[in-house]
Image (cartoon, coloured by chain):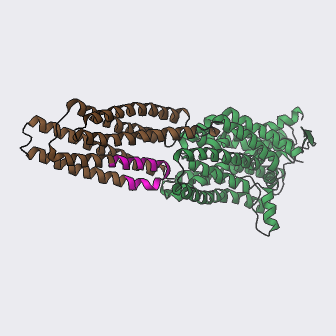
Chain colours: A brown, B green
Amino acid sequence: MQVFTNKSKELMDNIEEYLGYVTTASLHFEKAIKDYLAGRLDKFDERRKEVAHIERTADEELKKVKYKLYAFMLIPDARGDVFKLMDDLDDVIDYTKRVLLELSMEKPSFPIFIKEDIVLMSEDSVRAVDSLMLAVRALFSQTKMVEDYVNKVVFYEKEVDRIEEQIIRRIFSTSEVDELARKVQIRRFCERIASLSDISEDISKNLLIYTVKRMV
Amino acid sequence: MGFELLLFLSSGLFMGWSLGANDAANIFGTAVGTHMVKFRTAAIICCVFITIGAVRSGSGASMGLGALGSVNALAGAFVVSFCAAFTVMWMTRLGLPVSTTQAIVGAIVGWNLFSGNPTNPATLTRIVGTWVYGPILSALFSILIFTLVRRLVNNSTIHMIMLDRYTRRGLIIAGIFGAYSLGANNIANVMGVFVSATDLATIEILGVRFTGTQQLFLLGGAAISVGVVTYSKRVMMTVGNNLFKLSPVSAFVVIVSTALVLYLFSSQELSTWLISRGLPSLPLVPVSQSQACVGAVIGISIAKGTYRSINYKLLGKICLGWVSTPIMAAILCYMFLFFMQNVFMQQVFI
């Protein structure tokens, strides 16, 4: 009988491993941004490659999770939600990979006076991802905590928005950056870094719905 | 068993088939419909435990039914069982939620009227009373169990996937209890009327002694099992996907609550235990599993605070069934007994 096999444990391990990849990718992202801004381009490139590798491995793990969810007929009432959640989390890894890749290709030059703010912004973006991952884990085993973690995601997203606006205002009002194309490029990268927290917030809002559905 | 006996038992066997096809879905409908439990597993559990419940504990409810009217001729028992089955079939076609218990009680009263056997009003009131407080008791159990389960699940740190695993196991264990209780309680509807009309000698199969009544119940259990294997899958899928959209945890609560009610109304051990301690015991009579099930679902709605969504039209139909089903079965049985006696020249009572 399927009920007495250990498919449940296997799936739990797969999900846990996958969530670990999302967290690791976001941590590498933060370090990579710091390396880039500090001019440590070799280290930045190593991190970028590491994130690309994590993205590939996470994709493999995601396939296993999706397969096991449906092939073993596990959690029938929450299967669709977990499937969508795992897919959405894939966007977080994809996004970190893409931003780092674009940075490595375009190599934008950031003026010194905004570097500290960009570091703060990337730190808060990663904190938003971190809180999201705690909320996701809480969905699986401590539903009452989900809302607390989601509130943190929302808080960090607002912080990131505030810093982003501040940076963009400064870029467009300074004479240190004279070319409009450069201003636009810097703004685009700021928006990209900030988007990580936006993605986290979107996923966390869905999490609240999944939580209500999960409550008995 | 002779051919004549089997021929007269055929109406009871048909009733058993119908019970297996329909009532097994009340136990495993949601579990199978949502793929929490495989149909094969559900069918094996139903066949085995309904039969064990019928043979081991079926006599209590059967005697309760016998107290209403002891049908003493085989042809009479055939008519009673046939009319009950026919009423169930007819009412189902009319879309009314019908209970085999109510049909068989009505048919027995019809036999009493035809044979001049007095119907004990106290016994009748006791049986009819269970139709009302069976679903109410089931709703109360369901409120209690659901509240406990909800507190346990929502406050625990059990991983969602492990909870799913425990729920599957819970559904199987609850299903075993549900099947056993169904066999113990509802075998009276299938074979109860034949108990006084047949006189089978005790036999021994594989070292186990079976009395005449137990042989009848074993046969009834086999008929129920055939119903489960041949037709219940379709009903389970309908129950699981269309009628009640229950979560697996709610399904577990419904099965346990329903099974508890059926068990309370069929357990001789419990009844003896209560009487020995000077406590009031519940009458051992067959109760409607479907209506106990509806009671349990309503109980969950109340516990969740969503009782405004209760289908009062369905409730009204159930209450209507308490009156219309036995009356129709009684009239039908009276007419068929007349035909059996005067057209087919069979002795329908002694």
Which secondary structure type mostly characterizes the magenta part of the structure? helix
Residue A3 appears left or right of B200: left
Give the residues in magenta. A127-149
Quarter assignment of residue B268: bottom right
Q: What residue is at 44 percent from the left and 55 percent from the top? A: A145
Q: Is residue A152 magenta?
A: no
Q: Quadrant of the N terminus of chain B?
A: top right
Quarter assignment of residue A187: top left
Residue B252 visible, this orientation: yes
Residue B39 appears left or right of A150: right
Residue A166 appears left or right of B3: left
Residue B194 rendering spot, x and y as whole percentages: 83, 44
Residue B126 appears left or right of B210: left
Q: What residue is at 28 percent from the left and 36 percent from the top? A: A44
Residue B46 rendering spot, x and y as whole percentages: 71, 41
Of residues A61 and A8, which is closer to you in this image?
A: A61
Residue B145 rendering spot, x and y as whole percentages: 61, 57
